Amino acid sequence: MNKVAIVTLHGYSNYGNKLQNYALQEVIKKLGFDVETINFNVLELNKRSSIFVKIKTALLNPKKIFDFINRQRLNFLDKKLINEKISRFKEFSVNFLNEKCYELSLSELDKINDLYSYFISGSDQVWNPLYIKEYFKYYLTFAEKSKSISYSASFAVPEVSDEISFRIKPWLEDFNYISVREIEGQRIVKAITNLDVPVLVDPTLLIDKEHWIDLARVHEHKPKNKYILTYFLGKDNKTAFKRINLIAKESGFDIVRLGDLKAKIFYAADPSEFIDYFNDAEIIFTDSFHGAVFSILFNRPFVVFKRGNMNSRIDTLLSKFKLEDRHWDYVKEHENYFDIDYSHVDAILEEEREKSFNYLKKALGLKKEE
């Protein structure tokens, strides 16, 4: 048996999630394995409707209650458009991801363990404390220790509570190999288990620019004119958009607003079209980790914004590539929107790729420990 299962967040609306899943799949395939992304529903955990799960998740963070209510209102008003986006994401998954779904009871979980040589949890926010209901999946509690690996797993927060630490300690200790995506994640694992684990780049960075461009596709509403790209997952920054609009006016550029329900013609773009939009943008404004990643991959000018308590991943990314001056506060002060130095990035990226491939080869039994 030479089969690897990827266990990651599953859905049909988040570009970063789908593209990191695709990237990790392609990397593992390159190492000589058959790869499936598995999604399994445990029957005993699905008795409540999804709306109640979403409400509970929102209540865990009071600051998100308003955003949750607003999203539900928009979802109701724009259901057709949302369904179109979901449909296009599913089409992408059918075409480019090898997905496998299981419906199991709690007593049947060990059946999955017998089907694969290795399980990899990651990347993305698989260890985010908000996903408590799904913890058993992302900590691979159903798998043997010798088969359990995490690749660039993210907690997405700078710290976790004592209650969460106590709960996940035995699960972390039952991994054969652990790597995380952020420095804060490294500190969390160290504090809980006293293990020193590596910080490795997101799998999207392990695939070269040419591979991504081959996957890209032009969206039917892509402007023929040069354009500024915005991609925000949190609340829009009104001050920033005043400046963005001014830059667009002065330069004669259009504005493409990805992921924004108010910008309806762009909203249902699929992951392949997302890639093309980033590759051709004159400049990108984003609060998204993967927005920053694809800006770096395509060497595009970009500006990043803080978003709640989920900044650790972007801070780690910018620090790793010595691009800390791309934060909005610095850029607006110096007005160096288009002025970005990428001359040093390729060397850093090659070093990080080598580090990640060496880790995966060891974790997957292809290379002996030194």
Image: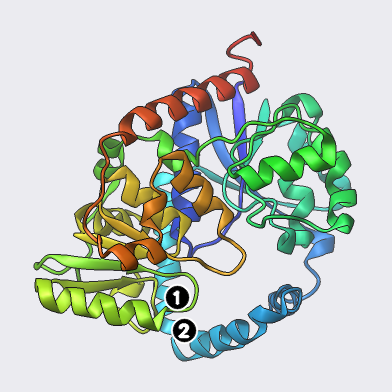
The answer to whether residue 239 is left or right of residue 52 is: left
Residue under numbered circle 2: 79
Q: Which mark is residue 2?
A: none
As displayed, is residue 177 above or below residue 258?
A: above
List x then y, in percent, for residue 132. 78, 60
Query: Answer yes or no: do the residues labelled 1 and 2 have beta carbons within 8 Å?
Result: yes
List x then y, in percent, for residue 106. 86, 51
As displayed, is residue 1 above or below residue 231?
A: above
Q: Amino acid at mark 1?
A: Asn
* Number of residues whose C-alpha sits closer than 10 Å to that of mark 2, classed few (under 14), some (14–19) or many (20 or more): few
As displayed, is residue 85 above or below residue 298?
A: below
Q: CA distance from mark 1 to mark 2?
A: 6 Å
Secondary structure category for the residue under label 2: helix
* Number of residues whose C-alpha sits closer than 10 Å to that of mark 1, classed few (under 14), some (14–19) or many (20 or more): some
Identify which residue, 21 or 257, lies in the foreground.
257
User: Which quadrant holds the C terminus?
Assistant: top right
Query: Visible in this render: residue 228?
Result: yes
List x then y, in percent, for residue 279. 24, 52
Q: Amino acid at mark 2?
A: Lys
Numbered label tally: 2
Identify which residue, 155 or 79, lies in the foreground.
155
Give the residue drawn at x 83%, y 36%. Answer: 193
Give the residue drawn at x 39%, y 32%. Answer: 349
Query: Visible in this render: residue 1?
Result: no
List x then y, in percent, for residue 48. 79, 74
In the image, farthest residue toward the front? 334
Q: Which mark is residue 83?
A: 1
Give the quarter of the image for residue 221: bottom left
Give the quarter of the image for residue 87: bottom left
User: Which quadrant holds the N terminus?
Assistant: top right
